[in-house]
Image (cartoon, rainbow, N blue to C red):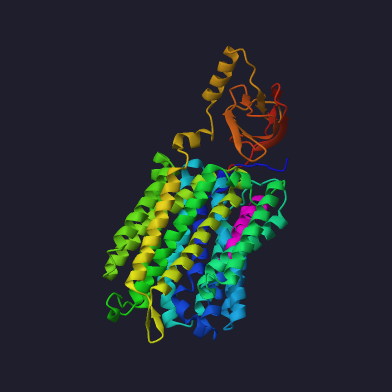
Amino acid sequence: MSHTTTGEPARRASGATVPVLAFAGIVVAVMQTLLVPVIKDLPRLLDTSPSNATWVLTSTLLSGAVATPIMGRLGDLFGKRRMLIASLAVMVVGALVSAVTDALLPMIVGRTLQGFAMGAIPLGIGLMRDMLPRERLGSAMALMSSSIGVGGGLALPAAALVAQHADWHVLFYGAAGLGVLAIALTLLVVPESPLRAKGSFDLPGALGLSAGLVLFLLPITKGSDWGWSSPTTLGLFAAAAVVLLLWGLMELRVAAPLVDLRTTARREVLLTNLASIMVGVSFYVISLVLPQLLQLPSQTGYGLGQSMVVAGLCVAPLGLTMMFTAPVYARLSARYGPRTTLIVGLLVIAVGYAGGLGLMNAAWQTVVTSVLIGAGIGLAYSSLPALIIGAVPASETGAANGLNTLMRSIGTSVSSAVIGMVLANTANDVGGVAVPTMHGFRVSFLIATGAVAIGLALAFFLPRRTPATTTQLRASSEEDANLARAEQALAGEEPTGFRGRVLTADGTPVARAKVTLIDRHGRQAGATLSGADGAYALAVPAAGPYVLAARAPGHGPLAHAATHTGDRPVDLDLSLPGETVPA
């Protein structure tokens, strides 16, 4: 039995753990948004053609998409903190490579390495699940999930300021410095999770998924340059379909797959992932449209004639509002469940985009639109990991959230390609320069509203789950356990499961020790507290291998592997190690 749950992880998580993990997420988002203010200048800065310069952005997107599920799975197998540090270290190396070059190829290599940091988001969410008590988990995951938007919102004006007043390479030195700080804080503050998934790393699955994603995302991001009906674009889409289909068939036959497609196909997981794509689409539209609208000269009749820095400051509330919605989300979710919070978030986004169609005449109006849409996206993003975590085993948290983060990335990629195409096709040609039109901006907002409508339809089909049912599995009181045993005794039944006593090494009974039953997938199958005489009893849902984890104040934890045949109770006494120094 390779899945162990020794220790009391929540006890080791300090108050600084959540802010440090959220900071790592913000660093990743800063890396992603870093070059947005200098996108239009990249061909000149790198002495290359505009179509080649787009590879500087495309390479980060592709490596991030590939790294996200892979790092999630590696974290489940070998330690989430270890893989989080590895992701950030690769990002720092990539930032330093980019900081010392003006050539296209080394820049693309550096940006590809920076994309690997995308794995930090699902790893951070997985660490939180493993370490935090239930009452802190909701708001912590909300903060981690919205850190992408927070970092993006804060990075835009900061990067614009640097790009306007200093050499653009300073952006990469800044990103490397933030990465080093995030690594140092993680080493100092964040404990490693004791949870491990069983099995080995599925290398063929990782290579197959990587190839399929690259073949799929490449034509999406380059389709407007190559032509959507060109043989290259259509050929890559066809190749992606074939590779991903073969990869899926292979994953279904592997004992320890990179992505458990059976879990992914569950209604709750599938609908949440599809809704994530729609939220990703809606998030990116405002990030693309508002900065352009704000910076267009007022002579166009609709441009707002603002500087790069002011444009960044007007869009910054998008990220700030996402950060402030995390505690609001925790309260809403605790009361109504993450499904309701997702629906509320999508409705707020829809109101923001619908209102934004008429609020395009002054800079303050774009700030109102940013605040509304940021609040909606903050609520929607915060709901996604909670929905995923509620539907998958604990040992698959990293991989499942990695896949969910990937779905958001696919949403932003599709959004980037579609909105880029819309703005290009509706632009006016003024002296050889394509100037976006107000019609193009409004069509982009309508597309975002359509994506939100699809997301809402998907969210309404998610199964209802009241907060009470999600917390009920976590622990049961001594009275509940005794009541269950009394009911079985009255019915003349012998409880089928594990029973025995929790004792010290010298045979003294341990009262009120928590005994948790964990199945072979890492899921909690039951929990109880020992009685005054140390006695406990736990029913099993089915025959098979289990781990019984026992802990009590003043004693070391114990994890005991045992197998249940399913026909009669198994007598098993649990002997706790000697006293421990309180943490």
Left or right, 503 with reference to 531: right
Q: Quadrant of residue 509?
A: top right
Estimate the x, y position of residue 455 in percent, counting from the top left: 43, 51
Q: Which residues are magenta?
A: 61-86
For this rendering, which residue is in front, 210 or 230?
230
Residue 462 position (above or below residue 448): above
Measured as percent of width and height from the top left, residue 81 is found at: 61, 55
Let me know if residue 133 appears in the view: yes
Residue 72 included in the magenta stretch of the image: yes
Q: Main secondary structure of the magenta part?
A: helix
- Residue 520 position within the rendered picture, expressed as x and y whole percent measured from the top left: 67, 38
Relative to 134, does residue 507 appear above or below in the rendering?
above
Q: Mark yes or no: residue 178 visible.
A: no
Residue at (36, 51) in percent of width and height: 347
- 117, 232: nearer the viewer: 232
Q: Which is nearer the eye, 431 or 484?
A: 431
Please give the name of the residue rendered at 61% of the width and 65% of the height, measured from the top-left corner.
Answer: 215
